[in-house]
Image (spheres, rainbow, N blue to C red):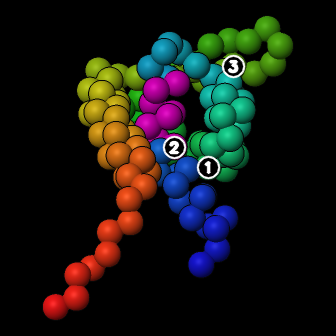
Amino acid sequence: MKLENTQVQMRKGILEFCILHIISRGEVYASDMLEELTAAKIMVVEGTLYPLLTRLKNAGLVEYKWVESSSGPPRKYYSVTEEGKKFKESLEKTWKELVGSTTAILKNQSTKTVKEK
């Protein structure tokens, strides 16, 4: 088993939640999301981000609008829908439960032995 593959899968598992959280703070441009995710070491690339944004839009969780730009083509700004806010809140509850459970397991340093019968 390769460590890198497991690490990638762990990051992918929380990527949707992180993207919804970023967008829920206010309208955001995709490259700004990419920059924040990269800085947080989630390590996504455009090839990962854009298909996920499309899936979130198709699911009715996010929407976008085009905004004219003085320095080039129009930009697509994303925002979270009401359904997306509820979805994100549910994911946040799940995330907190997982963090709590994982923390409890990591803090348990005792080694239990199986009793022989």
- Mark earlier in primary sequence (3, 1): 1
User: What residue lies at 66% left-to-right and 34% top-to-bottom?
Assistant: 40
Q: Position of residue 13 (x, y in %)?
A: 46, 51
Number of the label disc, if any, that sits on residue 15: 2
Q: CA distance from mark 3 to mark 1?
A: 22 Å
Q: Position of residue 70 (x, y in %)?
A: 79, 8
Residue 60 visible in image: no
Span shown in magenta: 15-22
* Nearer to me, 38 or 70: 38
- Mark earlier in primary sequence (3, 2): 2
Q: Position of residue 87 (x, y in %)?
A: 29, 33
Please, what secondary structure does the residue beneath circle 1 have?
A: helix
Residue 28 left/right relative to 72: left
Is residue 82 part of the magenta span, yes or no? no
Number of the label disc, if any, that sits on residue 48: 1
Can you tell which quarter of the image residue 99 is in? top left
Q: Quadrant of the C terminus?
A: bottom left
User: What residue lies at 52% left-to-right and 55% top-to-bottom?
Assistant: 10
Taking the view exactly as shown, the residue that stands out farthest to the right is 71
